[in-house]
Image (cartoon, rainbow, N blue to C red):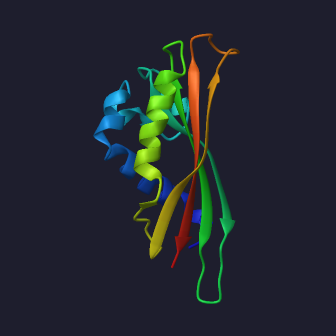
Amino acid sequence: MTGFNIYEVQKAVTTALKDNSTLTGMLGNGANGIRDNVASAKGLIFPYLAYTDIQAEPLDTTSGQGSIIYLTITAFTKTGNKKEASDIMREVHTSLHRADLTVTGFGYARSRWDGFSTIMQEDVNADMFSGIIRVKITLGV
């Protein structure tokens, strides 16, 4: 029941994101603009969010097992500037920083913001920007 259950963590994070109506109002497809990966976002209206990296490490103690999960969420925008990506990442931060999540199999799941950046996707399209936020989620029994 350690970090190998990252799908349950992603489900909990998705629920927290979808519960933020300001965030979903910013996405081209509303709550459906939060995607499992970039490939599943084909055909979506910009902007949208995708999970772009998930890492897990053990956090075992003498009293039980736990995990630290690092989840990277990327906002893909096409406005030609960083503002839209930054605004979306602000709402992701609002949804997930110091948030208590409900993750099946764990007594507690606490998330916090762990880093943020915006980049221009010059190799793809000059008007595409990405906002990237990394969230650390601590799971325990």
Residue 58 is situated, as x and y percent measured from the top left of the image, at 68, 70
Residue 91 is situated, as x and y percent measured from the top left of the image, at 41, 39
**Residue plotted at (49% across, 53% down):** 10
Q: Is residue 95 above or below residue 103?
A: above
Q: Is residue 14 visible?
A: no
Q: Is residue 27 above or below residue 115?
A: above
Residue 26 is situated, as x and y percent measured from the top left of the image, at 36, 28
Residue 130, quarter of the rendered image: top right
In this rendering, the count of numbered labels is: 0
In terms of depth relative to the viewer, which is nearer, 4 or 55? Answer: 55
In terms of depth relative to the viewer, which is nearer, 31 or 96? Answer: 96
Q: Quadrant of the N terminus?
A: bottom right
Residue 61, quarter of the rendered image: bottom right
Q: Is residue 50 above or below residue 43?
A: below
Q: Is residue 9 above or below residue 48?
A: below
Q: Is residue 81 visible?
A: yes
Q: Along the horizontal axis of the image, is 124 left or right of 88?
A: right
Q: Along the horizontal axis of the image, is 38 left or right of 124?
A: left
Q: Along the horizontal axis of the image, is 86 left or right of 45?
A: right
**Residue plotted at (42% across, 62% down):** 101
**Residue plotted at (40% across, 32% down):** 33
